[in-house]
Every structure is written in C-alpha cells, then in structure tokens.
Image (tube, grey):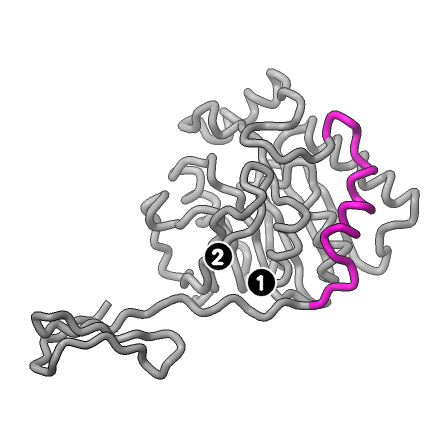
C-alpha cells in the first residue's frame, strides 16, 4: 500500500488499471491499493466434475468413498502411520492427522485456475487417497501427475484405485500418473511446474520446511497452491513467491468453497 497526502477533495476512484484502486480519505490521505487479479476464464475440459466422479469413485473401496463432512471420512490411521507422521514433524498436533480433500468440483476449478497443459507436471504433496492426482491426470491433460503421501495405508488405497482404473482402461498410458508413498520433504521435484499443498492442518515449521525444499529442488516450478495464506496463517513471506490469486475451491469439509491461494514463482 502506498499512501501520500493530497489537497484535493475527498473521493473514491477506481483506477483504470485492473490491479489498482485509489482511495482518498476526508483528511486528504490518498492510498493506492493493489488488488488481486480476477480468476482466469473457465477452461473447457473434455471431462467435467460429474464425469470425473463417475470414472474415479467406483475404483475406491466402499469405506474410502468420498463424503462431504466437517471431519475425517476415512478409516482411522494405524499406530505406525501416526508415529511416522509425528516423526516427520514432531511439533504438529493430532489436528494434522485430520483428513480432507478436494471435491471433484473443487479439483476441476483448480485445474481451470492453474491452466496447465501437456508440458506441465503437477505434484500434490500430501495426496492422501490420490483423488486429485488421478483427476489431474484424467481431466487436466498434464504430462505427468504425481501424488506424494506419507501414510502407507492411504497410499495403498490410492494404488488399488489406480490399478482398477488401469484394468478398466480408464487411464491415458501416453501420460504418466504416479502415486508415491514417501516423506514429501525428501522428494526431488525437479520437473514439477505446479505444486498443491493442502496445508490447513500443518504447523508453521513444517510448511517452512516444505517451501525450503521446493525453493532448492523444484527448479522448473511456476506455481504453488496453498489453502491457507502463507503470511497470515504461518508468518511466512518467501521472497521467491508472489501472491497471484486468492479464490475458493470446494473441499470435502467445505464443498461450497474454501480459500485457495495461488502463488507465482518469481525467483
């Protein structure tokens, strides 16, 4: 925000630029405030959210079918998975174990926002049951879609779903789909062009570690998506990221829309 004192009469004026508005108060203080750009126009995917749901959802076990609710809809994690999560980030609480994911509508909207193409590589870090990664592969047309999940149980369920989709001939074998059981802090990410972090249950230390990894290793990265503002929620202001868009996308705990923040890599 840039402010200066003006002797002109008080006014409220929308600047001709699409990203700036000028406000002059009754006391003659004029402020130029940058605002976020409008969301991009909606792309036309060959598969809409309903079609994606119809293809993907039957591939999951009954107890892992997507349900929209305020809390976790998946089976409880094993003691081993809980211990692995705590070891990865000792400062996190039980809240970090709560599961939620993009709805099919939310993932469709995210694909429209990111505007990815056949040369792009999408990573979902903390991919859970893998739905968003599978949908990105089927719907967005990216070169490669990768999900990285620490939980062995959730990774196994995701892989079973992919095996069933592959058996049914639903996947595009000309493009890669990978679901990896691993610690997201240990990945390479050299070819990633966009990364999604469902970080609402993560603590500041872990988010900072994840961003440090991406800054060092994701040399082709263009966009990072979070569902919490890095500055206000975590106190983080990475110099190599610029907030491009704040909008809302559907999540299982908020199908009508939950905040989503798209950061452009500007290093």
Q: Position of residue 30 (x, y in %)?
A: 16, 74
Say if 122 sits above or below 13 in the image: above
Q: Quadrant of the N terminus?
A: bottom left
Say if 145 sits above or below 126 in the image: below
Q: Which quadrant of the structure image shows residue 207?
A: top left
Residue toward you, 242 or 184:
242
In the rendered structure, does residue 50 fall within the stretch colored magenta?
Answer: yes
| Left or right: residue 219 compared with residue 27 | right
N-term-proximal mark, 2 vs 1 = 1
Q: Nearer the viewer, mark 2 or mark 1?
A: 2
| Left or right: residue 225 compared with residue 45 | left
The residue that appears at 49% across and 50% down in the rendered structure is 226
Say if 150 sits above or below 229 in the image: above
The residue that appears at 80% across and 37% down in the rendered structure is 161
Q: Which quadrant of the structure image shows residue 33?
A: bottom left
Residue toward you, 227 or 66:
66
Query: Please, what secondary structure does the residue beneath circle 1 have?
Result: helix
The magenta region covers 44-64
Q: Position of residue 172 (x, y in %)?
A: 84, 56
Circles 2 and 1, Cβ within 8 Å, touching? The answer is: yes
Furthest toward the top, the residue is 79
Residue ID for mark 1: 113
Query: Please, what secondary structure does the residue beneath circle 2 have?
Result: strand
Q: CA distance from mark 2 to mark 1?
A: 9 Å
Q: Quadrant of the C terminus?
A: bottom left
Determine the main secondary structure of the stretch shown in magenta: helix
Residue ID for mark 2: 247
């Amino acid at each position: 925000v840039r402010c200066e004192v003006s002797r002109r009469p008080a006014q409220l004026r929308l600047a001709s630029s699409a990203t700036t508005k000028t406000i002059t108060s009754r006391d003659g203080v004029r402020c130029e405030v940058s605002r976020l750009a409008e969301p991009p126009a909606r792309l036309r995917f060959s598969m809409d959210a309903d079609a994606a749901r119809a293809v993907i959802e039957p591939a999951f076990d009954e107890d892992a079918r997507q349900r929209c609710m305020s809390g976790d809809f998946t089976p409880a994690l094993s003691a081993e998975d809980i211990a692995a999560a705590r070891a990865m980030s000792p400062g996190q609480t039980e809240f970090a174990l709560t599961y939620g994911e993009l709805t099919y509508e939310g993932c469709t909207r995210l694909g429209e926002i990111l505007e990815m193409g056949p040369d792009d590589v999408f990573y979902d870090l903390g991919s859970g049951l893998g739905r968003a990664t599978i949908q990105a592969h089927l719907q967005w047309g990216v070169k490669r879609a990768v999900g990285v999940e620490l939980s062995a149980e959730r990774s196994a369920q995701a892989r079973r779903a992919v095996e069933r989709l592959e058996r049914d001939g639903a996947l595009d074998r000309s493009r890669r789909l990978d679901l990896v059981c691993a610690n997201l802090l240990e990945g390479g990410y050299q070819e990633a062009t966009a990364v999604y972090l469902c970080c609402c249950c993560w603590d500041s230390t872990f988010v900072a570690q994840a961003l440090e990894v991406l800054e060092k290793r994701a040399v082709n990265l263009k966009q990072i998506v979070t569902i919490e503002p890095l500055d206000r929620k975590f106190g983080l202001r990475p110099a190599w990221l610029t907030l491009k868009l704040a909008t809302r996308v559907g999540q299982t705990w908020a199908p009508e829309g939950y905040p989503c923040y798209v950061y452009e890599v500007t290093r």
